[in-house]
Image (tube, helix red, strand yellow):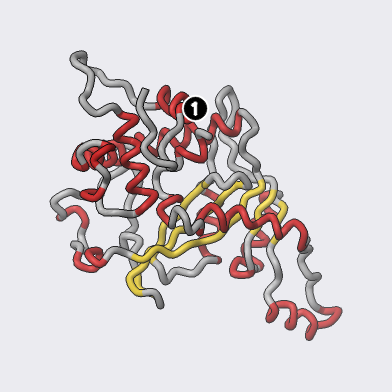
Amino acid sequence: MITVHGAGDLTDEQWAVLEPLLPRGTKAGRPPVWPRRQLIDGIRFRVRTGVPWRDVPVEYGPWGRVYDLFRRWQLNGTWHRIVTRLQSLADAKGASTWDLNVDSTVCRAHQHAAGARKHGDLQKEPPGGVFTEPCDHGLGRSRGGFTTKLHLAVEQGQKPMAIVITAGQRGDSPQFEPVLEKVRVPRIGPGRPRVRPDRVRADKAYASRKNRAYLRRRGILGTIPDKADQARDRRKLGSRGVRPPHFDPADYRERHAVECGSHCPRRGHQRVAVISTRRYSS
């Protein structure tokens, strides 16, 4: 049994859930020098703390082996398949609630990102992966400098259900529909994947007629506060104005899950990156 090195490493219970989902080797021979659990803990340490790959503690194995496993599974879509399977298992067990919270968080880009090639296919190691990289590479300039913005749909247990990456200067409201459209949890047994939440909570940045109409069209309850200028304009119209949207302040207080899921200061923004195994396997 592998000794757990840190508080953020996989427990035996989590590893028991995760291990069956990992790809099986096709070649027979001697067992690897560095077990997968150890390398995965190293990957999780790096994603959780944001340190350079070369600074991953030696207890997790050589940093090159840790990075190689991360990059190889990123390119062939293994991480995405693992997270999707964990989502399905959590939904089948009733461990996922379908009251989703939508919000965004901004990540400061590394200083070397400003000097990267504009054409990714000309890089020594192309981005690759199972998803098409956005033309702006998810990098843009905002008040915080060179930044990337993560748009999230998080359920009440703080499990990320969908992520959309844009440049840092992109607005939140236009990404409301794209992030909800990416929610797709396959069922363990027969049946179509689940794509429609029961309720969606969001802050005032998403208070637009377009977003509210999208929720009504899909039959999804919404808890989004009204903007002050929109309420003021309605009062000016009087009886000729549209009815104010229903808003439940008590239900809105449940939106803290998305804040914990994306802005947790102890784990940083990397917590919602490509690996979400800790939340799904707990």
Residue 48 pos. (x, y %): 39, 49
Query: What residue appears at the point 52 percent right and 66 percent down from the top-left corner?
Result: 172
Q: Quadrant of residue 112?
A: bottom left
On the rendered structure, is 63 left or right of 145? left
Residue 237 pos. (x, y %): 79, 83
Please tell me whether residue 85 is drawn above or below residue 209 in the rendered image.
above
Residue 274 pos. (x, y %): 39, 45
Instruction: Compare residues 143 and 236 and report the one nearer the observer.
Output: 143
On the rendered structure, is 189 left or right of 56? right
Q: Secondary structure at mark 1?
A: helix
Please tell me whether residue 68 is drawn above or below residue 126 in the rendered image.
above
Residue 146 pos. (x, y %): 33, 70
Extreme residue in the top direction = 28
Extreme residue in the right direction = 239
What type is the residue that disc 1 sits on? Glu
Instruction: Compare residues 163 and 8 and report the one nearer the observer.
Output: 8
On the rendered structure, is 8 left or right of 116? right
Query: What residue appears at the point 21 percent right and 49 percent down from the top-left corner?
Result: 54
Q: Residues within 10 Å of mark 1 (few under 14, many from 20)?
A: few
Which quarter of the rendered picture does the N terminus lie within?
top left
Query: What residue appears at the point 50 percent right and 59 percent down from the top-left corner?
Result: 263
Which residue, given by chain and number where applicable, does mark 1 sit on? 13
